[in-house]
Amino acid sequence: MEISVLNIKGQETGRKVSLNDAIYAIEPNDHAIYLDVKLLMANKRQGTAKSKERSEISGSTRKLGRQKGGGGARRGDINSPVLVGGARVFGPQPRDYGFKLNKKVRQLARKSALAYKAQENAIVVVEDFSLEAPKTKSMVEIINNLKVNGKKSLFVTPGADKTVYLSARNLERVNVTAANALNTYNVLNADVMVVAESALNVIDANLTK
């Protein structure tokens, strides 16, 4: 699959790049995508929910009533879970929600997400560019020139580019990521991907090891 390379003014440069069929032309695997996105979202969870168990409640241990004959549930002290203000049974405890996912499955998920974008013709390739200083106005001009305004856009740079990141930070529907930090969720969440030309080589190197 060949795509024309544009400059940041939205004009064709006369060059074309070939997308790697081993990534962009595969049959997408929806289950791999599901697992990878689930892992990404699980790793974002704080996991600090906590409720007090019976041994952690402050209160008297005096037995409140007879063991039998009261007509109600048995309860020992005031910390009993059956009483208002008592402990909670099997309540949440701090935990890590992450789980193990094989590297090849994660790679397959990213390939599948990129394949979907290729099928939708939602990949725009631009020649490598840089901004002299962080300026939102400059980023807005690029977005308008590439005719991706009004869409959720994911800009993929060859490496971490602080200037481009800061220029896009205040734009609501624009995200910027380095090619080696590309993940399945960001790709699927975007309506269109704007990929710097040399970022394609980084993606290829990461996903075809």
Image: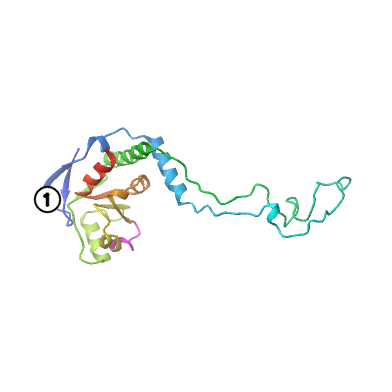
Residue 108 location, quadrant: top left
Residue in the image at 14% along x and 53% along y: 11
Classed neighbour count for the residue bearing mark 1: other residues with Cα under 10 Å, few (<14), some (14–19), many (≥20): few
Residue 187 image position (x, y, % from top left): 33, 46
Residue ID for mark 1: 13
| Residue 148 falls inside the magenta stretch | no
User: Observer-nearest residue: 94 or 132?
Assistant: 94
Residue in the image at 83% along x and 54% along y: 64
Residue 41 image position (x, y, % from top left): 44, 48
In this picture, is 140 found above or below 102? below
> In the picture provided, is 43 more to the left or to the right than 64?
left
Please tell me whether mark 1 sits on a helix, a strand or a loop. Answer: strand
Residue span colored magenta: 167-173
Q: How many marks?
A: 1
| Residue 169 falls inside the magenta stretch | yes
Residue 144 image position (x, y, % from top left): 23, 58
Q: Which amino acid, mark 1?
A: Thr
